[in-house]
Amino acid sequence: MRGRTDVTHRHWLFGDQLGPHFLASHDNGPGRDAPVVMIEARSVFRRRRFHRAKAHLVLSAMRHRAAELGDRVRYVRAETYRDGLREAVGDASVTVHHPTSRAALRLVRSLDTVRVLPARGFLLPHDAFRAWADGHDAKRLRQEDFYRWVRCELDLLMDGDAPAGGRWNHDHANREAPPRGADTLGAPKPYRPREDAIDDEVRADLDRWEREDGIAFVGRDGPRLFPASRREALSALRRFTEHRLAGFGPHEDAMLAADPVMSHSLLSSSLNLGLLDPAEVVRAAQDAWRAGRVPVHSAEGFVRQVAGWREYVWQLYWYFGEDYRHRNALRHEVPLPEWFLGLDADAVTARCLSTVLAQVRDTGWTHHIPRLMILGSHALQRGWDPREVTDWFHRCFVDGYDWVMLPNVVGMSQYADGGRMTTKPYTSAGAYIHRMSDLCDGCAYRPADRTGERACPYTTGYWSFVHRHRTLLAGNQRTARTVRQLERLADADAVLRAERERGEGPP
């Protein structure tokens, strides 16, 4: 039985460790009543030009958590974490759960007074993943293999030893194009929080930082759209599983200009702030399926996102090591242009990119397909520096953190690791966008046109990318056919010339 020493030291909560599971008392962690330290470090916002809505959400969530903890918390506003910790505890010892970034982990390990506890907020310990990965081809790990393993390990969406519905993967039912002629999917509306006095205080502080402290943001900070407290996050989870999950699966890869949310959960920021534990999220989806409220393909599609992909990305961030950040297998070194850095959607003619960039500008969010096949695909086709692309996604998305974006961008989106994480580069011509969205409707460009004034920039960009990397792609069985198609294009020279003439301006 633990003695009174439980409350003689303080426990440090980072700004993405805001749920009750970060104060539970197992794993030699803090006692249930241990005093808490929270540090609002302004240097975080000085180092990067974050989306203003993201800065608002993070600060609002931290201050809401501090308000919940009351007298139990010492909340310090300081220039750096070191300054804040010194002010909060002096030379006294503190505990902290394993941070979510390598930079933060280096910081806490450099402090003699800090004891680092195991990570929380994820489904598996690092050692379990490492044992699994070491037992596979560590140079080419595959998410599908991991996903099946974790389903078995956690007994998640299983019927005994068999997967729910008789198959592991229900993508065949979850890749439908949007209904033709429909402006929206017609899904029940998602949960939206109401701002309060804490949000007013945050907004006033951000205004003052911009006005007096030289801290700059990008994007717009409208009414807060995402949960900033545990209560709000649980409401959002209930709203999704009870009213929206049933329709999630079929159109999870589709895009509609007037309906960017569709049936998506909007829970990623709550998970990544630590307001929700992924275990409770996937169990809620499983319970909805077992109760007969949602079809198996929708439950499986969502569980795949959380247990299959989010968990996989977290584990790979640590497993691949620090040098993964510097991977650039395609040798892409073009800097990001100012119109993209500034989220200047109005400068873009291509309707798909303009629409998605405006969504990021206005909300700090889009779902995974616009991220991959509109934003990431354009960056890949243009040969933008993957480190700069990673930083942009980190800064501009409300759910963006180093651990989230590094594998997602370097591995999945930009193929900068040369195939260690995925089997091929993810990019496409305009035909894919036309098939999976209404974003080509009314566009100045035509998705099928490769040349001429109305040539689609995604189509010319796609063939230019294939030409530039044709040797690499010809050696990959999943892309060799595309190289052969390029060789048969009668107008290939004109397509490549059109792409060169387009330059680096907004498409």
Image (cartoon, rainbow, N blue to C red):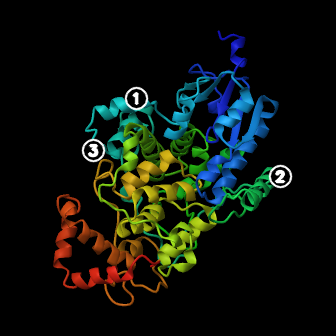
Q: Is residue 76 above or below residue 376?
A: above
Real-space Cα distance between discs 1 and 3? Answer: 18 Å
Residue nearest the observer in this picture, 77 or 261? 77
Q: Between 311 and 399, which is closer to the camera in this rendering?
A: 399
Q: CA distance from mark 1 to mark 2?
A: 43 Å
Image x and y of residue 232, in percent: 70, 47
Q: Residue at x 72, y 56 (%)?
A: 213
- Which of the two labelled residues, at mark 1 and mark 2, occupies the earlier sequence position? 1
Residue type highlighted by circle 1: Ala
Q: Which residue is mark 2?
A: 197
| SS for dot 2 | helix
Quadrant for the N terminus, please: top right
Q: Nearer the viewer, residue 453 or 468?
A: 468
Q: Which mark is residue 140?
A: 3
**Among the two numbered marks 1 and 3 on one chain, the one whose residue lies closer to the N terminus:** 1
Camera-nearest label, 1 or 2? 2
x 46%, y 32%: residue? 124
Q: Which residue is mark 1?
A: 128
Q: Secondary structure at mark 3?
A: loop
